[in-house]
């Protein structure tokens, strides 16, 4: 059984990398033919890829989001489907489009996992064939120096580890 490093990523410009990760990433498993840790990440590597770490499928994770409007946060959160997650960002499917740069506040609930009020910023919004929108969201705690929270970092690391373990079970 081969092992695979969680630190595989892509090389990016330092301005695009969150301050917590200011180091150069290199593909560790290039040419080895080993399976990727995540199916959703492995098939989407391209020159425009912005992720610095692989994301893991999150089938049992419930996510609710609220968007920041002109002067305040939306009062009601809405449920969205979580496609994949890591400690630096999440991909979700929503019924409404959001502009890039829109601030989002997310609540995560899963088996043994709960974390509320995680702030993020929409990095991409793509309309899917079924009329829904796929959003790529980067968490602000790791991308903006004044927003770092050790508690949120730890909670998201636990969510990431849980999803990684779940994927490992499904691969066997």
Image (cartoon, rainbow, N blue to C red):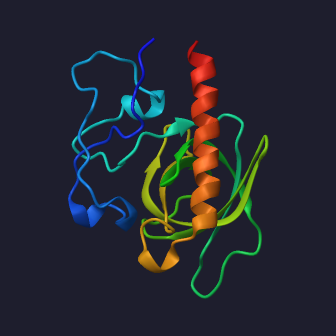
Quadrant in the picture for residue 31: top left
- Residue at 40%, 19% in the rendered image: 35
Position of residue 129 measured from the top left corner of the image (x, y, whole percent):
49, 37
Q: Can residue 4 be seen at all in this image of the molecule?
A: yes
Picture mark count: 0
- Residue at 61%, 57% in the rendered image: 154
Position of residue 73 measured from the top left corner of the image (x, y, whole percent):
66, 78
Q: Is 90 on the left or on the right of 123, as rendered?
A: right
Position of residue 57 measured from the top left corner of the image (x, y, whole percent):
57, 34
Quadrant in the picture for residue 8: top left
Against 21, residue 74 (above or below) is below
Position of residue 45 measured from the top left corner of the image (x, y, whole percent):
30, 36
Q: Can residue 58 be seen at all in this image of the molecule?
A: no
Q: Quadrant of the N terminus?
A: top left
Q: Is 74 on the left or on the right of 1, as rendered?
A: right
Against 132, residue 115 (above or below) is below
- Residue at 39%, 63% in the rendered image: 20
Q: Which is more toward the observer, 49 or 28?
A: 28
- Residue at 58%, 50% in the rendered image: 157
Q: Quadrant of the C terminus?
A: top right
Q: Which is more toward the observer, 68 or 32?
A: 32
Quadrant in the picture for residue 124: bottom left
Against 1, residue 64 (above or below) is below
């Amino acid at each position: 059984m081969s092992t695979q490093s969680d630190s595989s990523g892509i090389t990016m410009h330092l301005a695009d990398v969150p301050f917590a990760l200011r180091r150069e990433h290199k593909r560790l498993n290039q040419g080895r033919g080993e399976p990727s840790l995540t199916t959703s990440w492995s098939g989407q590597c391209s020159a425009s890829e912005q992720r610095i770490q692989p994301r893991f499928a999150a089938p049992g994770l419930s996510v609710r989001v609220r968007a920041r409007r002109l002067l305040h946060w939306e009062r009601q959160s809405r449920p969205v489907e979580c496609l994949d997650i890591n400690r630096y960002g999440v991909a979700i499917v929503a019924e409404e489009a959001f502009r890039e740069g829109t601030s989002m506040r997310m609540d995560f609930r899963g088996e043994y996992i709960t974390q509320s009020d995680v702030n993020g910023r929409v990095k991409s919004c793509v309309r899917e064939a079924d009329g829904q929108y796929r959003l790529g969201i980067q968490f602000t705690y790791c991308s903006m120096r004044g927003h770092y929270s050790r508690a949120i970092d730890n909670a998201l690391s636990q969510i990431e580890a849980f999803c990684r373990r779940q994927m490992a079970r499904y691969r066997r």
